[in-house]
Amino acid sequence: MRKKLRENLIAYTFCAPAYIVFTVFLFIPIVWVVILSFKEFSIITFNSAEFVGLKNYTKLLKDQVFLRSILNTLYFTILYVPGNTILGLIFALLLNKPFKGRNFFRLALFIPNIISMVVVSIIWSLIFSSSTTGIANKLLVTLHLKPIEWLSDYRYALIAVGIVLIWSGFGYRMLIFLAGLQNIPDELYEAAALDGASKWQITFKITLPLLRPTTFFVITTSLINSFQVFTPIYIMTGGGPGYSTTTIVNYLYTKGFSEFQMGYASAISVILLIIIMVLTFIQRKIGREDLIF
């Protein structure tokens, strides 16, 4: 008994730094934001914080811009999650095969992940330039198609941002899928080849089923990331035209750090936290079988 207690104390001692970091930088800020969401609080007049109960939340339900930001975020999620997952999987399957220059292509596809999102956003803003000097429109003209106002047309602005984030993010998912592919025993492929299975049968009967836990992880992390997108929208479109690209985080930033309504922004933060928690819970329920590998 005493030995077990001593072992537990040693374990908790080693874990203590992690607990302290999580408490200081995660749990305390979350509790503080929840408290602020029930107050009328401006960062300029810090001492005049006033308790207003559920006023910020009832105001959010009538806020058309906030409701629009939720729809925009969901629309963006529909673009971002499948795009990242499918491209990451396809390139992982291609680059898992041995061929000359494989490491170069792996590195080339991963490089966008280590470039600052600010730099990426500026470069793609030039590519999507509304004039014919933009590479995207030059390509369309070459194909005898009409140029598109990528960033100033409400029909294409969110799609343009989605393309940027998929381009910069699928290389990371590719690496995760490659790690998953390395864990599939070679004996399974050898047995399938001896039985005369075709490449398609091997892919759909062995590879993809055994990649289900990896796929679940990729989808979950992509989903959470899609609800936190901020930088490319802030730089490329500023949330416009109109509010066509305003997401929840962009609206939160506007209310908190442009209009200094910290109580209202905190309420938006709490709503965002609840949405992410609910989606993660649903995904864990759906993917429970996939976690057993």
Image (cartoon, rainbow, N blue to C red):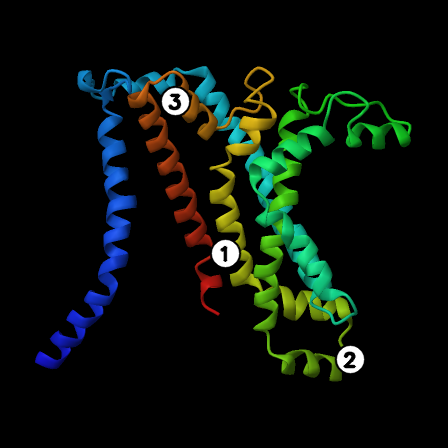
Is residue 92 depicted above or below 113 in this figure?
below
Is residue 242 depicted above or below 113 in this figure?
above
Work out whether residue 133 or residue 179 is closer to the camera in this orientation and state it: 133
Please give the name of the residue rendered at 71% of the width and 29% of the height, measured from the top-left corner.
Answer: 126
Q: Can you tell which quarter of the image residue 194 is in?
A: bottom right
Please give the name of the residue rendered at 67% of the width and 58% of the height, measured from the top-left corner.
Answer: 107
Of the two numbered discs 3 and 1 on the same chain, state the one appearing first in sequence.
1
| Percent position of residue 106, x then y | 68, 60
| Circles 2 and 3 in contact, beta carbons < 8 Å | no
Q: Which residue is mark 3?
A: 257
Counting other residues with Cα less than 10 Å from the Cα at mark 2, is it few (<14), some (14-19), or many (20 or more)? few
Q: Quadrant of the N terminus?
A: bottom left
Counting other residues with Cα less than 10 Å from the Cα at mark 1, is it few (<14), some (14-19), or many (20 or more)? some
Please give the name of the residue rendered at 84% of the width and 33% of the height, measured from the top-left corner.
Answer: 139
- Horizontal placement of 200 versus 231: left or right? right
What numbered label is drawn on residue 217? 1
Counting other residues with Cα less than 10 Å from the Cα at mark 3, is it few (<14), some (14-19), or many (20 or more)? some
- Horizontal placement of 29 versus 120: left or right? left
Three-letter amino acid code at disc 2?
Gly
| Percent position of residue 291, x then y | 45, 63
What numbered label is drawn on residue 145? none
- Horizontal placement of 26 versus 159: left or right? left
Three-letter amino acid code at disc 1?
Phe
Is residue 223 depicted above or below 32 in this figure?
below
Q: Which residue is mark 2?
A: 196
Work out whether residue 291 or residue 264 is closer to the camera in this orientation and state it: 264
* Secondary structure category for the residue under label 2: loop
Of the two numbered discs 1 and 2 on the same chain, state the one appearing first in sequence.
2
What is the number of callouts on the image?
Answer: 3
* Secondary structure category for the residue under label 3: helix
